[in-house]
């Protein structure tokens, strides 16, 4: 936050810490509930204003949700989101995300630019999944992944 030219207050710091320490892309209300436990004087309006300031200064971005709400993410590296109908938003692993963006291909991107009359310097994807349900991950995947890293 210190490098973003945003005045650092205790409440802003607490909101940022709460946002940066989770992968669940919380709503303003969820962050308010989390931070209020440490900072009882916090108001929901302050959380809204703080999140707006984070978005404006590039500390966080907004993720529109099919359920109508807005979720926030302090992870600013390019990554693809999957939004589920129940409101949850998940990060797609980077290797899969870059394959999805690449799958758009230069021809399709060029045709979209000409037919929509826009230029697309950078593309980010938010996939909305309808009617899906969660399935348990195959067993042993985690061990295989950490073995690969070793
Ligand atoms: Zn994310």
Image (cartoon, rainbow, N blue to C red):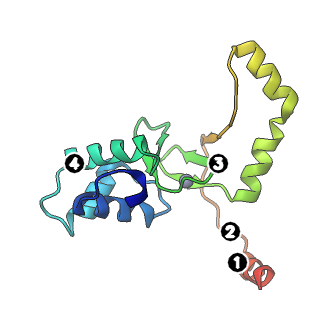
Query: Which mark lies nearer to you, 4 or 2?
Result: 4
Q: What whole-number distance in Å separates the C-alpha atoms at marks 1 and 3?
A: 21 Å
Name the residue carrying label 4: 46
Query: Which mark lies nearer to you, 1 or 3?
Result: 3
Name the residue carrying label 3: 80
Position of 43 with respect to 114 (left or right) is: left
Sequence-earlier tag: 1 or 3: 3
Q: What whole-number distance in Å separates the C-alpha atoms at marks 4 and 2?
A: 39 Å
CA neighbours of label 1 inside 10 A, class few (<14), some (14 to 19), many (20+): few
Determine the residue positioned at 68% across, 37% down: 123
In the image, residue 24 above or below residue 44: below
Sequence-earlier tag: 2 or 3: 3
Q: What whole-number distance in Å separates the C-alpha atoms at marks 1 and 4?
A: 39 Å
Name the residue carrying label 2: 137
Sequence-earlier tag: 2 or 1: 2
Q: Are marks 1 and 4 in contact (CB under 8 Å)?
A: no
Query: Does residue 70 appear in the picture of this structure?
Result: no
> Which of the labelled discs sits on residue 142, or is there none?
1
Badge count: 4
């Amino acid at each position: 936050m210190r490098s973003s030219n945003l005045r650092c207050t205790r409440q802003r710091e607490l909101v940022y810490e709460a946002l940066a320490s989770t992968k669940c892309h919380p709503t303003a209300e969820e962050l308010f509930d989390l931070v209020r436990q440490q900072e009882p004087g916090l108001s929901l309006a302050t959380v809204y204003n703080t999140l707006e300031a984070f978005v404006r200064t590039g500390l966080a971005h907004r993720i529109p949700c099919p359920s109508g709400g807005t979720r926030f993410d302090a992870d600013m590296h390019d990554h693809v989101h999957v939004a589920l109908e129940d409101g949850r938003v998940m990060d797609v692993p980077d290797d899969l995300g870059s394959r999805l963006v690449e799958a758009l291909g230069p021809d399709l991107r060029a045709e979209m630019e000409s037919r929509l009359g826009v230029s697309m310097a950078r593309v980010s994807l938010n996939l909305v999944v309808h009617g899906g349900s969660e399935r348990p991950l195959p067993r042993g995947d985690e061990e295989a992944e950490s073995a690969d890293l070793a």
